[in-house]
Image (cartoon, rainbow, N blue to C red):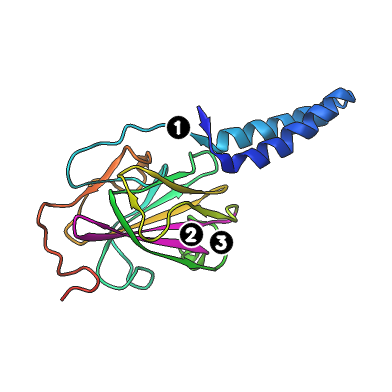
Amino acid sequence: MKIDRAGYPFIAGALLPAAALALTRRRGLAAALGLLGGFFAYFFRDPDRAVPDAAGVIVSPADGTVMTAGPADKQWAPPGDWNQVTIFLSPLDVHINRSPVGGRITRIDYRPGKFLPAYKEASNDNELNELWIESDGRTLVFRQVVGLLARRIVCRVEPGDVVERGERIGLMKFGSRMDVFLPLDAQIFVSVGQKVVAGETIIAELPAGGDRAGEPGRA
């Protein structure tokens, strides 16, 4: 299995001292650092995914557990009317993030904030990276949100980039949350408590030629 390049410094930072300690017969510390290096390799794993190709489907941008599936809270949502799917990533989940749809990245907004547990409502004030994507004339928004342990967001796309559905776009280090804001006519297929897989699980579907009246910037 591949390991994302963001993990290399963490893995080397644990395994190189482990090797040095093993040579000096300090086996306890060597074993502890070796286990830590193994955890880092597991955390930064980057498995390939079988992305569905059906028209109009929206895939999960992250592995994890669904926290919200329904109308968005306007206090925290982008301007306009949206449905929302929120996914919590534990430290054991794959942390590679993927685009939920194919389209063009039109806007990326970084917002500094707190580092509260990502599974609590107060975490809406956390540091985040918000990506807007236009897909077949429709706009979707998804957010990389940090948590108590996640202290860095990695985003590898820029405004103007064209991405495919399920394409890797970045990651969040050590636990966090992903919010997806969908047009109101999107049919949501997941429920609270459900486990989802990035790039594979279909979380929603947009009807062909759906009503765009509720989307931002539309009358």
Is 61 placed above or below 52 here? below
Tag 3 residue? 116
Could you say which quadrant of the image residue 30 lies in? Answer: top right
Q: Residues within 10 Å of mark 1 (few under 14, many from 20)?
A: few
Circles 2 and 3: CB atoms closer than 8 Å = yes
| Rendered residue at 69%/30% (across/down) | 35
> What is the number of the mark on residue 120?
2
Nearest the camera: 46 or 76?
46
Mark found first going from the N terminus, 3 or 1: 1
Q: Residue at x 58, y 55 (%)?
A: 152
Q: Nearer the viewer, mark 3 or mark 1?
A: 1
The image shows residue 115, relative to residue 163, as above or below, that is below
Residue 37 in the image: above or below residue 103: above
**Decide: marks 3, 1 in contact (CB < 8 A)?**
no
- What range is drawn magenta here? 127-148
Lateral position of residue 54 relative to residue 153, left or right: left
Disc 3 packing (10 Å; few <14; some 14–19; many ≥20): many
Q: Is residue 141 magenta?
A: yes
Badge 2 amino acid: Lys
Residue 189 coordinates in the image, percent (x, y): 23, 46
> Where does residue 128 sit, x and y in percent of width and height?
48, 62
Q: Relative to residue 95, is residue 178 depicted above or below?
A: below
User: Dot 3 lies on which element?
Assistant: loop
- Looking at the rendered image, the disc whose residue lies closer to the viewer, 2 or 3, is 3
Amino acid at dot 1: Pro
Q: Label 1: which residue? A: 47
Judging from the image, what secondary structure is the residue with disc 1 in? Answer: loop
